[in-house]
Amino acid sequence: MFDGLRLLAPLPLLWLAATFGRTLRAGHTPLIERIARRSTPGLSPQLCRHTRRLTAVWCGYFLAAAALSAVNAWLGAIGAGSVGLAVLAGSVLMFVAERWARPWLFPQQAFPGLIQQLRDTWSVFRISGGPGANGRQ
């Protein structure tokens, strides 16, 4: 029997995609750039381009994960928990890979440690009700 509540599973992923995506509009600061500027206010133009691309990649990832989740919810092919774990594992992999590659891509740039990066991320989400609430920051 089909359970319509399974179709709610993609909603948090769509919210994340919208949160990242709306900061990519013209005149707005990309979400990841806002996070990066918490510890390093003077980002180089190259790093700003990188944060914009990275914000777009995360947005695309969340859209793809939401689509996978929706298809799975509709077809019921794989357990919802398995899809959720796959999305979580993919998110952790992307985060770790970017943190690993960043010093090689920008050897002249100093980056905050993991704890500071988590604090910066939390502060961006906390200010003004969320990262998209004041999109022109």
Image: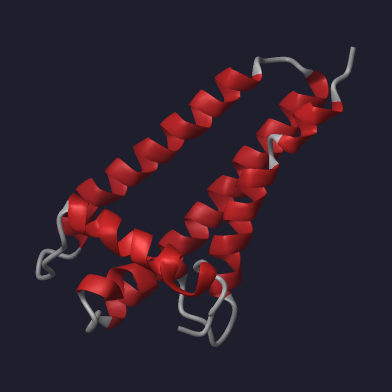
Name, please, the residue furthest toward the bottom: 27
Quarter of image, res 34: bottom left
In the image, residue 125 above or below residue 97: below
- Percent across and percent down for residue 29 are 46, 79
Quarter of image, res 90: top left
Left or right: 108 in relation to 52: left
- Percent across and percent down for residue 60 are 57, 52
Left or right: 3 in relation to 65: right
- Percent across and percent down for residue 37 are 29, 75
Name, please, the residue furthest toward the top: 1
Quarter of image, res 3: top right
Q: Tell me, what colour scheme is on the image?
A: secondary structure
Q: Residue at x 54, y 87 (%)?
A: 27
Numbered label tally: 0
Q: Which residue is drawn at 72% across and 25% down?
A: 72
In the image, residue 55 above or below residue 84: below
In the image, residue 54 above or below residue 81: below
Q: In which quarter of the image is the N terminus?
A: top right
Left or right: 95 in relation to 101: right
Left or right: 27 in relation to 50: right
Name, please, the residue furthest toward the right: 1
Q: Residue at x 56, y 18 (%)?
A: 82
Q: Which residue is drawn at 50% across and 68% down?
A: 131
- Percent across and percent down for residue 21 are 59, 65
Q: Quadrant of the C terminus?
A: bottom left
